[in-house]
Amino acid sequence: MSQLRIALPPLADLTLDSPLQFAWLDRQGQVIREGQSTLLQLGQSGKTPAIAFFLHPQDSLLASIDLPILPAGKTTAAVQCAAQALILGACEQMHIAHSPRDEQGRVHIAWLSREWLSQFGQLLRMARLALRGLYSGAYCLPVADGPVACVRDGHLLVRHSLQHAVVHPAVDEALSDLLLEHGASVQWIGEALPETTITPLPAEQRWTGTLPGWGLHGGIQQRSAGQSGWGRAAAFCAMAVAVWTLGLNLYAAREATQGQRLKTHMNQRVKQAFPELPVILNPLQQARQQLAARQSGAATDPTQRFASLVLQAGSGMPFMAGSVQQLVFEQGELQLSLLSDARKTGSDKQWQTALTQAGVAINATDDGWALRPAAEAAASDVDNASGADDE
């Protein structure tokens, strides 16, 4: 799969329309095309693969430190402590990345402003470009048996190994030290130098470096992950609210159903107890009014009492239909004479309990039943008891 690599200008000056040098590499890692474009144009071209970006030498801040063998977590902590002595400014404002510990016990570190990383990540999102990696500028150089060097924008870039590279702002002094230390093993990309012992490489080789196993892209990916994490948290909160609302609605619907069932049951009981009521609107209030009227003697009209007792008997005595032989109403009492077959079936206690709860006193007679309002029956019993005491 082909690769796209871009050399960035200083991040402080980078915009969507900044001119950028780029190179396309084939599957073997060789340059097949170089050119110039912008982030905006690359995003609009469509089907652009994930891009490896190389920082401008001005932003390529690198160092190496010696560390003993440590667990991964302690290595990171040690790097953070060591970086405090190297970074000019507040460490918390910098994203610090580091390589694995090499065979010589060295760990290579790089750092960059979190603000610049955030702005760069925002530009990538605006241009709809995918990030493969963000590396210091010297890591675009190839890895060879000896150091590979070139000059870019007044800085000397040197690639020593897969994980190790350096950037020097003082070109002449750094180059002299490099030649003094490594001599003929140095390979050079760019214009020929007076030093004839240096091995020259083609100019396009400055794009072909093997990518290291570490870089500064973690600062952008962590921020994106944090944003997506907040998005997931918000989605979970919204889901929780939706579930809570659904549960609340189901609970309210169940309570409403139970309330309606209770109201229907109360209406039926009041209608059974007070059949003279044409409409049941407020069962509790209407029942209280009817009981008060009966207790105060307001319902003493014989015609009304007869109709009430007949309705109570018809609704509360299931065996009454087609079984009444004679019906007599006198002195406020309704006497029912039943056929002989109906007398046997009327011994069920359930209907008697229902009529008693409805305020009707029931007494068995030789040929049927006698019904009268319970309040009057209780008063009659009290009078009879008083008369017996007087005697």
Image: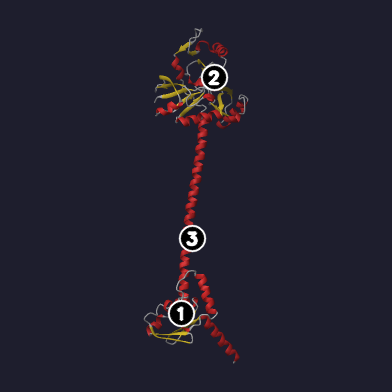
Residue kind at label 1, given as amino acid type: Ser
Q: Quadrant of the C terminus?
A: bottom right
What scheme was used to colour the molecule?
secondary structure
| Image mark for residue 6 | none
Q: Looking at this view, is 226 or 261 the one in front?
A: 261
Quarter of the image holding residue 115? Answer: top right
| Image mark for residue 255 | 3
Quarter of the image holding residue 155? Answer: top right
User: How far from the left and from the top, in percent, is residue 348?
Assistant: 43, 78
Dot 3 and dot 2 residues touching (CB under 8 Å): no
The residue that disc 1 covers is 308
The residue shown at (56%, 17%) is: 169
User: How far from the left and from the top, in percent, is residue 22?
Assistant: 44, 21
Q: Name the front one of labels 3 and 1.
A: 1
The residue shown at (42%, 24%) is: 3
Residue kind at label 2, given as amino acid type: Val
- Compared with 123, 203 (above or below) is above
Q: Looking at this view, is 21 or 136 the one in front?
A: 21
- Compared with 111, 145 (above or below) is above
Q: Looking at this view, is 380 or 195 the one in front?
A: 380
Q: Which of marks 2 and 1 is nearer the N terminus?
A: 2
User: Looking at the image, can residue 30 be seen?
Assistant: no
Dot 3 and dot 1 residues touching (CB under 8 Å): no
Q: Name the front one of labels 2 and 1.
A: 1
Q: Which of marks 3 and 1 is nearer the N terminus?
A: 3
The residue that disc 2 covers is 166
Number of residues whose C-alpha sits closer than 10 Å to that of mark 3, classed few (under 14), some (14–19) or many (20 or more)? few
- Compared with 178, 323 (above or below) is below
Say left or right for 337 vs 112. Answer: left
Number of residues whose C-alpha sits closer than 10 Å to that of mark 2, classed few (under 14), some (14–19) or many (20 or more)? many
Q: Distance between the residues labelled 2 and 1?
A: 109 Å
Label 3 element class: helix
